Amino acid sequence: MNESYYHSRKLRGRDSCPNCHCHHCSKERKKIHEGNKNNTSNTNTFNPIFNPSITVNISPEYTPTPIGVETVQYLTLAEEGKKVYTNKDALKQYGSSDILDPDNVSTLNLFVNGVLQPPSIYTVEEGILHLESSDLPPKDAPITLLFVTVKG
């Protein structure tokens, strides 16, 4: 078969010779077949099995105990050079609580200027917050001691 005839047929999107078994035509048919085999838009092989089941055990005799979380916060403003803050320093006008006993809460977090501080730089006891870092907060930086208690 003449090569120019083959290319003119190929450019028009037709198989050059459907019954031809020459090397060139066989190679083209194989390329087209492999392209179709690997093309996911031509086949639908995704057959998911979705069988959700939910079992709800309802017992009229049992009522679960609700659990809850209570949060309380101590608020104050930093003073230059000050390392110890007490209940007297609390900003009660903003809803500040006293400094709670850490043994009576689930967890506590200290924020200075909105940044969570590592527990290694402070200690807390009932009524007292002691900053142990040599790098103290700037004057008027907000100090928030957040107490979280899980109930239930």
Image (cartoon, rainbow, N blue to C red):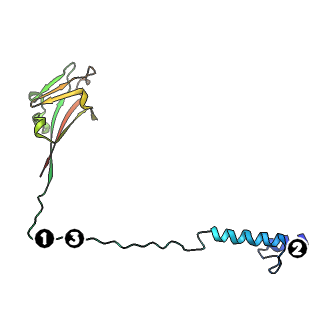
Sequence-first disc among 1 and 2: 2
Q: Estimate the spatial distance between the alpha carbons at disc 1 and disc 2, rounded to whole Å.
A: 82 Å
Badge 3 marks a residue whose secondary structure is loop
Using the rendered view, name the quadrant where residue 132 is placed. top left
- Quarter of the picture containing the N terminus is bottom right
Categorize mark 1 by other alpha carbons within 10 Å: few (<14), some (14-19), many (20+).
Answer: few
**Up-down relation of residue 51 to residue 109 (above or below):** below
Q: Amino acid at mark 3?
A: Val
* Location of mark 2 (residue): 5
Q: Is residue 11 visible?
A: no
Q: Is residue 41 visible?
A: yes
Residue 149 x %, y %: 14, 44
Please give the label number shown on residue 135.
Answer: none
Q: Amino acid at mark 2?
A: Tyr
Horizontal relation, residue 103 to residue 114: left or right: left
Please give the label number shown on residue 59.
Answer: 1
Residue 131 x %, y %: 20, 25
> Which circle, 1 or 2, is nearer the viewer?
1
Residue 38 x %, y %: 63, 67
Using the rendered view, name the quadrant where residue 96 is placed. top left
Which residue is pictured at 81% across the width and 81% down the height?
Answer: 19
